[in-house]
Amino acid sequence: MNDNIQRLIRLQEIAFEIRDLTARRDAVPGRLAELEAAFQEKIEEIGAERLTHETLVTEVAELRQAEQESRQRLEKAQRKLMEVSNQREYSAVLNEIDATKTRLAQIVTEISGREGRIEELAEPAAEADERIAAERQRTDQERLAIEQELSSIVSRLEELAAQREELVALLPAPYVRRFDTVFKARQGVAMAKIFHGACGACHVRLRPQVINLVQRGEELISCESCRRFLYAAVEGETDEPTDPPEAPSDKQGAPRPGHSAATGS
Ligand SMILES: [Zn+2]
């Protein structure tokens, strides 16, 4: 196969890799924001548990105070019952005893309800600081992993840009121009491997003559349907279609500045 056609194939591979890496690079800020939001949500949840625990403990202390007061009132009323001298006073004291007993029962119920919840929350609340620290650490580790991934993406992109420049410098200008024209017009896919006698990109069946010309590998041959440049699988290569990654819409597929193969030509 003509060296220049080989170079164009490599140029296409580089373009695919750049497209994937660029998408991954552009997703990084969103991933970091998501990570931080999840952390904030978690610490709010932990903080809310601690706050609920504190509130319940305060309420129980107040209720115990009220319970003690009610018990004292009850004892006082019971003593008073022995000293009353008439029926009217007797009824009044009895009423007071009943009311105090009702109130006491209510307080005891309120205390026991809160104590159950306090018990449930005691450990999470006591460990809130440790849990927040652990969440922070986990989040930091994840962020570090994402940042490391980003830095390897960025250096790989630099590598690819350099490789592309080298290739473009080696290619005769008309090859680069033709490649670029199809690349821009065809959603970033200028090269198509022949697969089962059809164009690997648009899947239209190719005439035997066209296939012969492509196999000879002497010049650039276009698919008559999609205009992409065809190439034959290298002997021994696994015969699989060269379906490009999900072709983006025309608008998104337009090469970004600096990503065009023609850069520097
Ligand atoms: Zn085609």
Image (cartoon, rainbow, N blue to C red):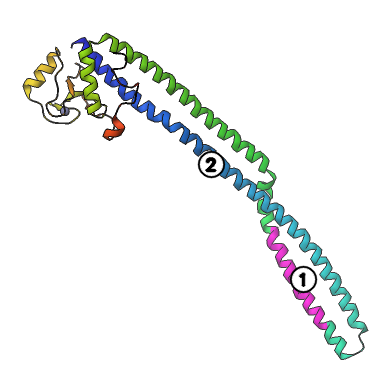
The residue that label 2 is drawn on is 38
Q: Report the amino acid beneath label 2.
A: Ala
Q: Is residue 114 magenta?
A: yes
Expressed as whole percent of the image width and height from the top left, the position of residue 200 reads: 19, 27
The residue that label 1 is drawn on is 104
Decide whether the magenta segment is chiefly helix, strand or loop: helix
Q: CA distance from mark 1 to mark 2?
A: 45 Å
Q: Nearer the viewer, residue 182 or 129?
A: 182
- Closest to the camera, between mark 1 and mark 2, is 2
Quarter of the image for residue 180 reads top left
Q: Is residue 192 magenta?
A: no
* Residue 209: mark in rendering: none
Query: Going 74% across and 67% down the picture, which residue do you hit?
Result: 108
Quadrant of the image containing the C terminus: top left
Query: Going 86% across and 70% down the picture, which residue do you hit?
Result: 72
Expressed as whole percent of the image width and height from the top left, the position of residue 258 reads: 35, 21
Residue 226 appears in the rendering? yes
Q: Which residues are magenta?
A: 94-115
Which comes before the other along the chain, label 1 or label 2?
2
Query: Going 11% across and 29% down the picture, which residue do you hit?
Result: 205
